[in-house]
Amino acid sequence: MMDNKKEIIARRIARELKEGYVVNLGIGLPTLVANYIPDDMNVTLQSENGMVRMGPAPEEGMEDPDITNAGGVPVTILKGGAFFDSAMSFTIIRGGHVDLTVLGALQIDESGSLSSHIVPGVRVPGMGGAMDLIAGSKRVIVATTHTVNGNEPKILKKCSLPLTAVAKVNMIVTELALIEVTRDGLLLKEIAEGVSVEHVQSLTEPKLIIDKELSTF
């Protein structure tokens, strides 16, 4: 069931990519987006560990231990790709050359603030490049399941965990909904097929604004 949720999220986010974009996919769920980019679309995937033109996951048995994403997961590299050091990678990120960043989340709030890197009392590897990516990217999409364990909302009025960034998220995509962060609040633009607005709202802490042209995905 969880894998199906992740697939739904990754497929929908892939539709937000545009021809010619430079895109960074965060560790975990966001990396799955690479598997759903149309073959005829020219998108450059940048990985913070030092790669451009990153491709989808390799076929089983074809993994190369020297070609991984920032999370250490085997990936492929497409024709025209290149490897470089972290200094160059973060020059690309901090220089504003990334059109879109897709990140996971522990919590997101109605202002577009994000908590993604630490849970009090739990040992975690740290923030990594998330702060740089959010600050340097032209657009930020959060890819996350709608709840924790099916009942605890991740989309809150205000994040309670330490923040990774303040008011930087532009869009939230879950297995239930696509939500835009606006000055007026969270705008519900799409819901998954077979899901009701009432169900989405019941699992979302802030009051949602319903788009007049609400559609399904």
Image (cartoon, rainbow, N blue to C red):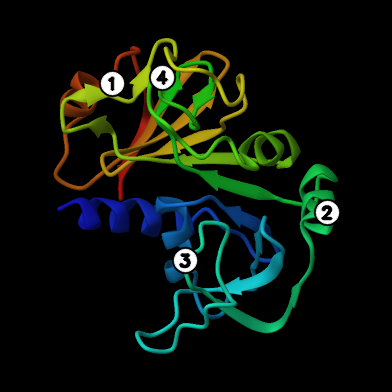
Residue at x 42%, y 12% (from the top left corner): 160
- Helix, strand or loop at label 2? It is helix
First reached walking from the N terminus: tag 3 or tag 1: 3
In the rendered image, residue 15, in percent from the top left (x then y), is placed at 47, 58
Q: Which residue is drawn at 61% across and 47% down?
A: 101
User: Type of residue at label 4?
Assistant: Pro
Tell me the SS state at disc 4: loop
Q: Earlier in the sequence, mark 4 or mark 2?
A: 2
Select label 3 or label 1 by which is in front: 3
Q: Residues within 10 Å of mark 2 (few under 14, many from 20)?
A: few
Residue depth check, mark 4 versus mark 1: number of the one nearer the observer: 4
Label ID, residue 204: 1
Could you give the CA–CA distance between mark 3 and mark 1, rounded to whole angstroms?
32 Å
Query: Marks 2/1: CA distance?
Result: 39 Å
Considering only order in the chain, which callout, 1 or 4, is on the residue closer to the N terminus? 4
Residue picked out by circle 3: 73
**In the rendered image of this protein, does residue 114 appear above or below residue 137?**
above
Cα–Cα span, label 4 and label 3: 26 Å
The foreground one among 82 and 142 is: 82
Callout 4–callout 3 Cβ contact below 8 Å: no
